[in-house]
Image (cartoon, grey):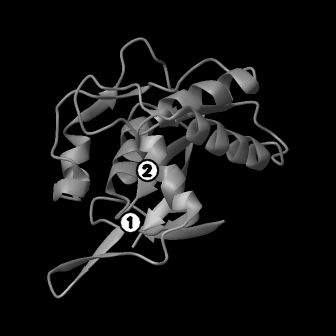
Amino acid sequence: MFSYFYEHPLLKRPIKISYLYEYNSYYYFRGGIRIKNPNFTSIDRAILDLKKNKFKAIELFYNKLTDIFDSFDDLENVYFSAIPSHTAGNNISAMHIIAEKLSEHYGKDDYSEVLQRYKTIPRLSDGGTRNMGVHINSIRINSGFNVEGKDFFLIDDITTSGSSMAAGVQILKIGGANKVTCLALSHKF
C-alpha cells in the first residue's frame, strides 16, 4: 500500500490518502499523438471495468479490500462510504456497491451513500477542476444518516489530486465524524 498527502490552505493539517496501485492510462499523448501505453496492466483494465460497474471488477476489488480489512484488529466503530460520482443524484457506483458489500460482510449499517453529490460538476477526466472547494460545494451528507462520533473508511476508485477525498473528509468531519481514513484503489499521476 502506498500513500500521499493532500494539502490545502483551508485544511488544518494535510490529509493522508492511501492507495493500492498506480494507475496507468490506456493511452498517453506525446507531441499531440495518442499512443497506446505499454505500461497498461490488467489492474488498470479492472479499474476501467469498475467504472462501468462490471461484476468481475467489483468482485476483484471487493476481495482485495476484504483481505486488507480482515487484517485490522478493531472495526467496531468503523463504517464504509464511497466518494459520489460527478453527477448529481447518481450515487450508485461500483465503489458504492463495494462499500455496501463491505458493510454487510462486517455486520455494519450501510453508510455507502452517506455522501451525496447534489450538484453536478464536470468530470475530472474531461478537464473539470481538481479544486477541493468545487467538491465541498457539490457534496453533502445524505439526509437520514447520522455520522456523529463514527469512524469512516472513505473509498474511491481513482484519485488524482486528492481534492474529492479531502472534501469528503471535511464534510464528514463537519457533520461530526470522529476519524476518516481515505483509501483509493489507484492513484493516477
Asked if residue 108 lies left or right of residue 172, the reply is: right
**In the displayed structure, would residue 186 be above or below residue 141?**
below
Residue located at (82% from left, 42% from top): 70
Task: Check disc 2: other Cα within 10 Å, few if <14, some if 14-19, many if 20+.
Answer: some
Residue located at (42% from left, 31% from top): 93
Asked if residue 127 lies left or right of residue 7, the reply is: left
Residue 135: horizontal and vertical position, in percent?
25, 45
Residue 184: horizontal and vertical position, in percent?
52, 53
Which quarter of the rendered picture does the C terminus lie within?
Answer: bottom left
Q: Amino acid at mark 1?
A: Tyr
Q: Are marks 1 and 2 in contact (CB under 8 Å)?
A: yes
Residue position for label 2: 48
**In the displayed structure, would residue 10 be above or below residue 157?**
below
Residue located at (25% from left, 39% from top): 86
Q: CA distance from mark 1 to mark 2?
A: 9 Å
Asked if residue 4 lies left or right of residue 133, the reply is: right
Say how many tags the image has: 2
Task: Check disc 1: other Cα within 10 Å, few if <14, some if 14-19, many if 20+.
Answer: some
